[in-house]
Image (spheres, helix red, strand yellow):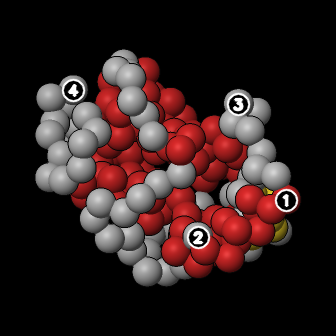
Amino acid sequence: MQNIFQKEDCDQFVKRINLLTPDTKGFWGKMTVAQMLAHCNVTYEMVYDNIHPKPNGFMKFILRLLAKKTVVGDKPYPRNVGTAPQFIIKNDRNFEIEKSRLIAYINKTQELGEKEFEDKESLSFGKLTSKEWNNMFAKHLDHHLSQFGV
């Protein structure tokens, strides 16, 4: 798995993102490329922006029990896997804006580095190791960039 905290790996993600065009079609799923970029931005919004509601204690327990291993583990996501409601992007999005936002989030995460994320609190899963944060970021990006052929 690529390491979102290493510049070379981040540059590879950015290179792949820059291969996308507003007309790029996905190999599976229903999202447009702009919606996919917005969808990927949600992961970072949950870290850096205070725009998504924090799950209550019971929901957080359920998420840790049922989803955490899938989200932060080493195993890649299968195609057409379900997602949390806040990740569902139904409206049209501006491709260039979402692309720029995603690249900025990736670069910010890399610049902050692993130490910033060690035992950092996740909105949904509680404290995560930097490896778990990396897995969540990197495999989510890889999954969706592969979905769109880059």
Earlier in the chain: of badge 1 and badge 3, it is: 3
Residue 99 visible in the picture: no
Answer yes or no: do the residues labelled 4 and 1 have beta carbons within 8 Å? no
The residue closer to the viewer here, 147 or 108, is: 147
Task: Classify residue 32 by image quadrant.
Answer: top left
Earlier in the chain: of badge 2 and badge 4, it is: 4
Apparent side of residue 95 relative to residue 123 in the rendered image (left or right):
left
Determine the CA span between mark 4 and mark 3: 26 Å
Secondary structure at numbered mark 1: helix
Judging by the rendered image, the residue that carries numbered circle 4 is 22
- Nearer the camera: disc 3 or disc 2: 2
Q: Is 10 located above or below residue 126 in the figure?
A: above
Q: Which quarter of the rendered picture does the N terminus lie within? A: bottom left
Residue 85 visible in the picture: yes
Answer yes or no: do the residues labelled 1 and 3 have beta carbons within 8 Å? no
Label ID, residue 51:
3
Count of number-bearing discs? 4
- Nearer the camera: disc 2 or disc 1: 1
Q: Is 62 located above or below residue 141 in the figure?
A: below
Earlier in the chain: of badge 2 and badge 1, it is: 1
Determine the CA span between mark 1 and mark 3: 18 Å
Label ID, residue 67:
2
x and y percent of residue 113 in the render? 69, 58
x and y percent of residue 34 in the render? 32, 30
Earlier in the chain: of badge 4 and badge 3, it is: 4
Judging by the rendered image, the residue that carries numbered circle 1 is 57
Answer yes or no: do the residues labelled 2 and 4 have beta carbons within 8 Å? no
The residue at the point 19 percent across, 53 percent down is 28
Rate crowding at label 2 as few (under 14), some (14 to 19) or many (20 or more) other CA atoms within 10 Å.
Answer: some
Determine the CA span between mark 2 and mark 1: 15 Å
Secondary structure at numbered mark 2: loop
Dot 1 amino acid type = Gly
